[in-house]
Image (cartoon, helix red, strand yellow):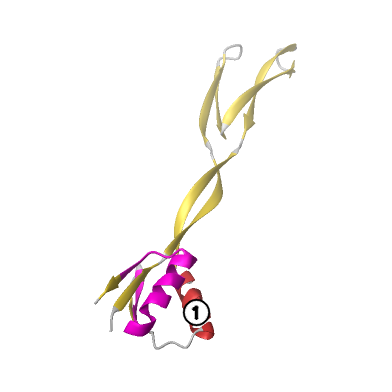
Amino acid sequence: MPSVEVFYMSKNKIVSKEDKKDLFWYDDKKHKMHIFSASRLDLEYKYDEELKEYRMFPKPISEPIRKKVSSIDKTSVDSWFEAYSNYNDIEATETSRDENSVVFSVDEDELEDFAYSLERSGFGFSIRD
């Protein structure tokens, strides 16, 4: 009986994460350093009560960063095999499992249909005798 190793599918997820860093702004009129925790600083024009004049002040802005993160979907092979075995009369059985793949023992007569179904579902696999 040949063995078919089916590799888990990887899924890409988009994750939002706040991008905060320490930003320094030196107030040259008051001779003071200000530290903000934000993504960036915008400047806004407003009235300074202490100096009694209009001037530019920093405005901290926090913006999220979107990242694409790849993760392994370990349930994809199980759900595929359950659906495949419900619609087909098969003798295939799971023989082993590790963190990257699942190995099935498949009868020679149903190997072609098994491999075709894996291809159609987008799984990577290898056949060993």
Report the magenta residues as a range: 101-126
Q: As shown in the figure, which amino acid type bears the numbered disc 1?
A: Tyr
Provide residue 123's location: percent of width, then percent of height: 43, 65
**Can the viewer see residue 94?**
no
- Work out whether 38 lies above or below 2: above
Image x and y of residue 125, in percent: 35, 67
Nearest to the observer: residue 85 or residue 61: 85
- The crowding category of the residue bearing disc 1, from other C-alpha atoms within 10 Å (few below 14, some 14 to 19, many at least 20), is some
Examine the rendered structure and indicate whether residue 106 appears above or below residue 41: below
- Vertically, is 73 above or below 105? above
- Describe residue 68's horizontal placement relative to residue 127 as left or right: right
Residue 4 drawn in magenta: no
Q: Dividing the image into 4 quarters, which one contains the C terminus? A: bottom left
Identify which residue is drawn at 60% across, 26% down: 41
Q: What number of labels is visible?
A: 1
Residue 47 place in picture, x, y as percent: 75, 17
Q: Quadrant of residue 127?
A: bottom left
Picture residue at 61% right of the left edge, 36% below the top = 62
Q: Residue at x 53, y 54 (%)?
A: 13
Residue 55 placement: quadrant? top right
* Disc 1: which residue: 84
